[in-house]
Amino acid sequence: MQIIRHAFKDPSDATEIWLLFANQTEDDILLRNELEQLAVQYPTKFHLWFTVDRAPPGWKYSEGFVSEEMIREHLPSPGNDVLILLCVSTRVDSFSILGPSNMTTYRTVWPHISGVAEI
C-alpha cells in the first residue's frame, strides 16, 4: 500500500500499477475499501482485480486460483518498461498458483515476471 500511495502522490508521475489480489474469501481481503477507493480515484493509474477461492453470490471479480488467463486479462503485457512482481505465501500448494513454487518455473511460464517474494 505504501508503494501505491507514494506513486500517486506526485501528479506528474505516470506510473501505472496493476494489482491482482488473491484470497480465500471476500472477508480475507486486506485493505479492500482503501484499494477500491484508490481504483476509483486513479482509474487510469491503478488497475485492481480480485480473485477468491469461494466467491459470494453477485461477486464481480474472479473466482478461483490465479491462472494464466487471469494474468493475461488483468496484468499488463510484457515490455521493457513493465515490472511484474509476485508475492506468494510459502504455504501455497505447488499447483495452486503458477505451478511449482520456484523462480525457475515462474520465469519459464511467464518470463516477464521480474521477481517473486515468498512470505
Image (cartoon, helix red, strand yellow):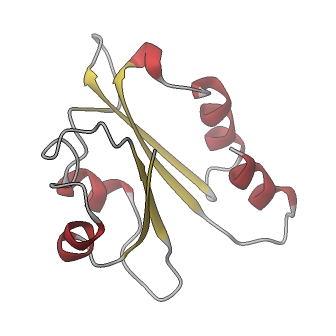
**Residue 34 as seen in the image, left or right of residue 74:** right
The image shows residue 46, relative to residue 119, as above or below, that is below
Relative to 47, is 22 on the left or the right? left
Name which quarter of the figure residue 74 lies in.
Answer: bottom left
- Is the N terminus in the top left, top right, bottom left or bottom right quadrant? top right
Report the side of 20 relative to 15 (left or right). left
Percent coordinates x, y for residue 104 in the rendering: 23, 73
Q: Nearer the viewer, residue 103 or 82?
A: 103
Q: Indicate the position of residue 100 as horizontal and vertical percent values.
A: 16, 55
Q: Residue at x 80, y 56 (%)?
A: 6
Q: Nearer the viewer, residue 79 or 60?
A: 79
Residue drawn at (12%, 45%) of the image: 95
> Residue at the spot x=86%, y=56% of the render?
9
Residue 97, horizontal then vertical, whole percent: 23, 47
Residue 8 x/y as whole percent? 78, 56
Above or below residue 14? Residue 22 is: above
Up the image or down, 109 lies above or below 68; here it is below
Res 35 → quadrant: top right
* The one of 113 and 9 positioned closer to us in this rendering: 113
Pick out the residue farthest to the bottom.
80
